[in-house]
Amino acid sequence: MPRRISPTLVILVCFLVLAIRAQVISALSWGHDSFQLTEWLINYSGGFVRRGLPGTVIGIVSDTTGVQANSIAIFSGFACYLLLAIYLLRRATPIFPAVLILSCIVIGFPAYQDSIVRKDCLGLLVLIGILTVDQKLLSRATTIILINLMAGIAILSHEVFVFYALAAFIFFRHRDQKAPTRNDLISRGLSLLPAAGCFLLTLIYHGTPAQAEAVNQSWLPLWRLIDPGNPALETPSASIQALGWSSKQGLSLSLYLLTSGFYQPMAWAMVFVISFGLMILFTDRDNMSHTSPGLAVKIKFTAIMVGQWILISPLFLLGVDYGRWLFLWVASSIVLYIENRRAPLWMEMLVHALFKKARFQQLFQRLPARDWYLLFFGVPVCWNLHNFLFASPICRHFETIWRWF
């Protein structure tokens, strides 16, 4: 008998479509001051610089076809987003309910926080490609070449790929293989030396104010088409301007936010803890019963999430885009699970012992995963009271309707 479609799922789909539609409309006017658009348009006009590969390719395609570069960037961002959504809905739903996939914790986050036109989904698609190639029956040389090629493209698009993708590729084992030895880890790490070289280049040539100026100048005709008459167009802004930031500046900003008071660190901690709790609660929800082995699935996935948290933790000191780190953490963990990766055995054993000691089996039975929980949870962009209250799908759309009156 087919499973009944949840009314909450229908509501979430409608809300998500409305959020995507609103972002498509607003994206057409994004330009010089948009962090989303300018992230795609960083190029090599001032020499090699981190994140410059997509912008260089977009410039070539734009010059060849006559299509405006901002349209190509917007199309690329939405195409990556839709491909990732389709992949997760097709492959992940046996373990992770569709209502969870479409919530603000996973695929709903870029839609509700105006970040579809970012490179996050591109990196996750590359991770899927690398894991797929690694499982194919190809020669070792061919596998290494393809993986390094894809990893290099991802790193030259956005260097954070190393933290949520390559690190997991090295340390997480495949299926039920035995735990990798030290020599196995060294061998796998050495096979990724070309990708490591790309990462090293982004660290050394991360960008300067002069290069940001050159990149901005290369897009000046585009900025004038999008926003004619703006006197600030000749000054680098948004993601292009951020190329001139040093890692020391990023670290100082992160430390300031984390130590500036009690409220913000605790608020973000709460969002991550709730997100983590909901992910574990809903994992294998539709297969759980008093006698089913569903707890084993939760343990395996929890270990992956814990491992991924450790691997991406440096990002919380290098940047303050905590919502993006949350999305990359959760989405990459789901990808790793459905592509048959497993956390180190000691981590799974530790999680299993914790679940047993805390009697999580009984807790999951007493606290069922209700779909409607996900209507009232969202990830805010910044931490004023209004943004916190209206980050969830239902409150965001309630606010929109209220404005009509």
Image (cartoon, helix red, strand yellow):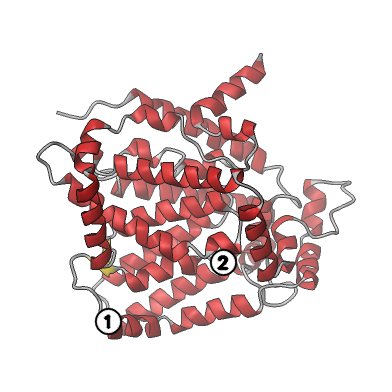
In the rendered structure, the answer to whether residue 277 lies left or right of residue 155 reads: left
Name which quarter of the figure residue 175 lies in.
bottom left
Tell me, for residue 139, which label it has, or none.
1
- Left or right of 344, for residue 264: right
In front of the other: 321 or 258: 258
Q: In the picture, residue 247 is in which quadrant?
A: bottom right
Q: Look at the image and tell me whether residue 67 can be seen.
A: no
Tell me residue 273's x, y (percent): 43, 45
The quarter of the rendered structure image containing the N terminus is top left
Closer to us: 150 or 115? 115
The three-letter amino acid code for the residue at tag 2 is: Ser
Residue 365: image location, x then y, percent = 21, 34
In the image, 150 versus 193, the foreground residue is 193
In the image: residue 237, left or right of residue 132: right
- Give the quadrant of the C terminus: top right
Depicted 213 relative to depicted 263: above or below: below
Residue 103 visible here: yes
Give the x, y percent position of residue 92.
Answer: 30, 48
Q: Secondary structure at mark 1?
A: loop
Q: Which residue does the image show at 61% across and 76% down from the upper left?
A: 203
Tell me if residue 63 comes above or below residue 32 in the rendering: below
Query: Regarding mark 2 in the picture, which secondary structure is present there?
Result: helix
Distance from disc 1 to disc 2, alpha carbons, whole Å, reads 27 Å
Q: Nearer the viewer, mark 1 or mark 2?
A: 2
Residue at 34% over, 72% down: 171
The local crowd at label 2, few if under 14, some if 14 to 19, many if 20 or more residues have their Cα within 10 Å, is many
Return the disc, 1 or 2, that comes first in the chain's sequence: 1
At 45% from the left and 75% from the top, the residue drawn is 149
Asked if 42 appears above or below 268 in the picture, the reply is below
Q: Which mark is residue 157?
A: 2
Q: Amino acid at mark 1?
A: Ser
Q: Residue at x 84, y 54 (%)?
A: 233
